[in-house]
Amino acid sequence: KDVRLVLYTSGKVGEPANIAARYSGVQLGFALGASVELNFAKVKQDGTGVVSYYRADGDGNWRYASSITTLLSRKAVVGDVVEFEIPFKELGIEPGKSVTLGLTLEEEGKLRGRAPARPALAQVPTLVQGKEIFSMTDPAGDDNGPGTYTYPTNKVFAQKGLFDLIKYTVYDAGKNWQLAFDFTALPNPWNGPQGFSHPIILLFMDVEDGGRTDLPKGAEAAQVQFDPDHPWDVFVRIAGWPAYGRHLWTADGKGPTLVGVASDPKKGRIIVTIPKSIVPNITGWHYILVGSQDGYGKDYIRALGPKAGEWSGGGCPDPMWAPQIYDYLAPSDHTQAQILGSYSAQGRHFVTLIPVQVEPAR
């Protein structure tokens, strides 16, 4: 009997899908839009073979859909471990999108096995596209605010570098701008739909005349103010939850406008895509702040106090006036500790941030 290893994937909204596996007839718990199959009977003696791609027709049948042009990239190697590859493009899987997967071992009328036991949801990383126009590194290990801040005590915060921004890069991607924020660590213990859980990024840009030097609603919990010479025109809030973490506002009160947010956890990277129709010019002066995301906190920012608690940060002697952020991209002629420690309870003022200049490399 022909035994096949079959990888099933969900399809796009509106495309035909079948409800049962092709050979065993077993329902796998999600709509099956396509399959990638390896027939062990056709594997050569040296362990090499080719996988084939099929599309569901919505009536329980499957249509051969592999292109001859992708034959060389659909290789399979069979040994103690089975390895095969197929281009995302052929499967119709787009970068930054999610896809449901199920793997089966089956023959006609029989399911021999499946993995995992339930359908798996996988997110395909967004690819950074376009020309790099600006990049700046930030010191590693400085996610301690003015030098004293500590993480909450719950074990979910045990890993170092959760709020440690180490690089900021801007790309010109045709009709869009792409912004990449690289972190020391980017786990997702709470299954944030955008691929990350811990950081919340507040990005303010001075890219045109006018603007504001105070914090807008939606960011007041950060407790900072801005350089009067560089008032912000655009504010973007970025977090792992799309309900509040892909939003853009302008200083003149427009918004929120939704932007694209995705992640590449292996690289520790968060990628934000902003259409040029919304922000025509990206060069100018940028402020990048990183806090701890808290779905129940004011403005979704986790509070800091003198002593760390299970769900609150510590090392902050004056929660009324001190900035509630862990990391900040400081210009090269200043230090983060110097700037974030410049608040005054006696003078009743927050820290005044200094931006970094974003301009194309010469």
Image (cartoon, grey):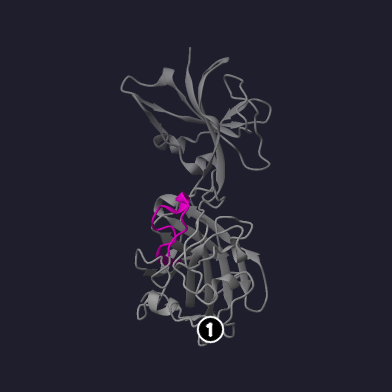
Residue at the image point whose x is 35% and y is 63% from the top: 141
Please identify the quadrant where the C terminus is shown.
bottom left
As drawn, which residue projects farthest toward the left? 46
Residue 358 visible to an observer of this rendering: no
Q: Where is residue 140 in the image (x, y as percent from the top left)?
A: 34, 64
User: Does residue 157 show up magenta in the picture?
Assistant: yes
Q: Front-most of 278 and 330? A: 330
Q: Position of residue 315 (x, y in %)?
A: 44, 67
Q: Front-most of 19 and 230? A: 230
Residue at the image point whose x is 53% and y is 39% from the top: 91
Neighbour class for label 1 at 10 Å: few (<14), some, many (≥20)?
A: some
In the displayed structure image, the side of residue 17 where residue 133 appears, left or right: left
The span picked out in magenta is 150-170
Residue at the image point whose x is 58% and y is 14% from the top: 109
In the displayed structure image, the side of residue 135 where residue 202 appears, left or right: right
Q: Front-most of 122 and 65? A: 122
**Which of the 4 image quarters holds residue 80?**
top left
User: Does residue 195 show up magenta in the picture?
Assistant: no
Q: Position of residue 306 (x, y in %)?
A: 47, 68
> Residue at label 1?
349
Q: Residue type at mark 1: give it.
A: His
